[in-house]
Amino acid sequence: MFSAPTYQGRRSRLATDLGNGLILLVGNIDASMNYRGNPYHFRQDSSFLYFGGPDVPGLAMTIDTATGRSILYGDELTIEDIVWVGPQPTLQEKARKAGFDEVRTMDRLVSDAQKAGDKVHYLPTYRGDNVLRIARWTGRKPEDIQTGFSEALIHSVVSQRSIKSDEEIAEMTWAVDLSGRMHVSVMREAEEGLKESDLASLVTGMCEAEEVTPAYGIILSVDGQTLHNHHHGNTLESGQLVLGDFGAESRMHYAGDITRTFPVDRHFTNKQREVYEVVLDAEILSIEACKPGVAYRDIHLHAARIIANGLKDIGLMKGDCHEAVAAGAHALFFPHGLGHMIGLDVHDMEDLGENLVGYDSDVKRSDQFGLAYLRLARKLQPGFVLTIEPGIYFIPELIDQWRSEKKHADFINYSALEKYRNFGGIRIEDNVLITEKGYQILGDPIPKTVAEVEALRYTV
């Protein structure tokens, strides 16, 4: 954990922002896999962690906005619990480390929350068990909980969590450095005849060796054209590309999110190299465009124009690149957003509402295919940490649909695409901190130029 004053300061600011009522932050509980004694791996709620909640199941906290007083609710382990899980620090000890004013048992929360009546502020919940818990504590109907959250509390939490402190940056840098070592190991070990699962197990093992877990489901596939591909059953074959999108959590649950793409063979083919260089140019130039005050949507569109222009040079697109991007024609190849906020969540604070995190009154979400998936669009600020991850993909089903509709035929050379149906996909991603004057790529450099990647692959 960070120091007690860190958490006390965060909770104090929250109380000041809200100004009235009782703030209720809910920790997660164990979720059973198939029976109560066999739960899934426990992951604490990120906002609960951020404001000082201990990383154990079954807790909640309140903050009195009038006094700033914070209370941690939970029940101490019984001797039966200790027999199974071993001795643990007491709740009193955990509360002291996070600077809470008091510890109360869970049964006290019902009377405390209901005493506040309709002035209880809580966040949206993504788990059904917490819907029922909040309903029981507040005396409300479960169906009212999903719509009764406090938008004022959301705005305050987003405002704080968006700006990463030096302590948080250190945690994220640790996560990125481990993620980078994981990627280098995969690029070194991959060879024809191995299964994707062999490489995925290497990633998982490196996390376990550091007593952490992957920050999200591992994407490691020769079918890189499927954006969130968690299948690991293919065997690597000569001529294919491997797309690896995975990262580690730090011990305090801050995420790393890195993507690299490399050939199964020692070298890229000419066709692979051409497309790869376009993606790499888009990634590098997008990073260089980052600075405070620049809208991330503008950087996304800049990356899209770089991709459209590069594909035009290859012969896969045609016409004016600015017009092609304005029309959305590039999204056949680049159908997702350039990146997103990252922190305690790999898609940071997505549970609080993507539009409230990545958009504001100045920038509204588009409904255009591709651009609609941009998770972060608003102006960048010092302290933001975000991913930059352009890509080019050849998705046969999407190509066939657009071609049958003659969609964007003025900008897409459909006849030339036939030779790329089995190409797969390429994505390159780094994690970037916005500084007062520009940007900083987190962590040690991770090989990504053609020469760097091939140097690793040459050892195969």
Image (cartoon, grey):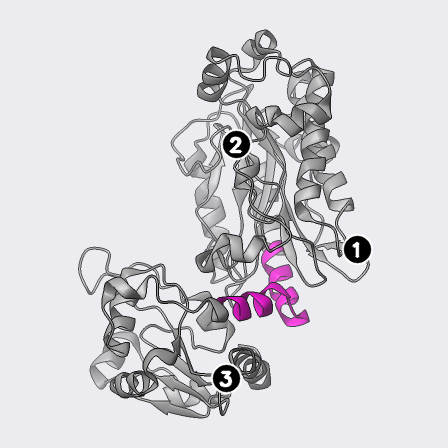
Where is 335 relative to 142, above or below?
above
Question: In 3D space, how far apart are the residues under numbered discs 1 and 3 (Cα atoms)?
Answer: 33 Å
> Which residues fall within the magenta stretch?
154-176
Q: Are marks 1 and 3 in contact (CB under 8 Å)?
A: no
Name the quadrant containing residue 297.
Answer: top right
Image location of residue 384, percent across then percent down: 66, 59
Is 70 situated left or right of 160 in this image? left
Image location of residue 139, percent across then percent down: 24, 77
The residue depicted at 69 percent of the width and 24 percent of the height is: 323
Question: Label 3 sits on what residue type?
Answer: Ala
Image location of residue 391, percent across then percent down: 61, 33
Looking at the image, is mark 3 or mark 2 nearer the viewer?
2
Labels 1 and 2: the sequence-earlier one:
2
Between 139 and 200, which is closer to the camera in this rendering? Answer: 139
Labels 1 and 3: the sequence-earlier one:
3
Question: Label 2 sits on what residue type?
Answer: Phe
Is 333 situated left or right of 104 in this image? right
- Furthest residue toward right: 437
Q: Are marks 1 and 2 in contact (CB under 8 Å)?
A: no
* Residue for badge 1: 438
Question: In 3D space, how far apart are the residues under numbered discs 1 and 2 (Cα atoms)?
Answer: 30 Å
* Residue for badge 3: 98
- Magenta part mainly helix, strand or loop? helix
Q: Helix, strand or loop at disc 2?
A: loop
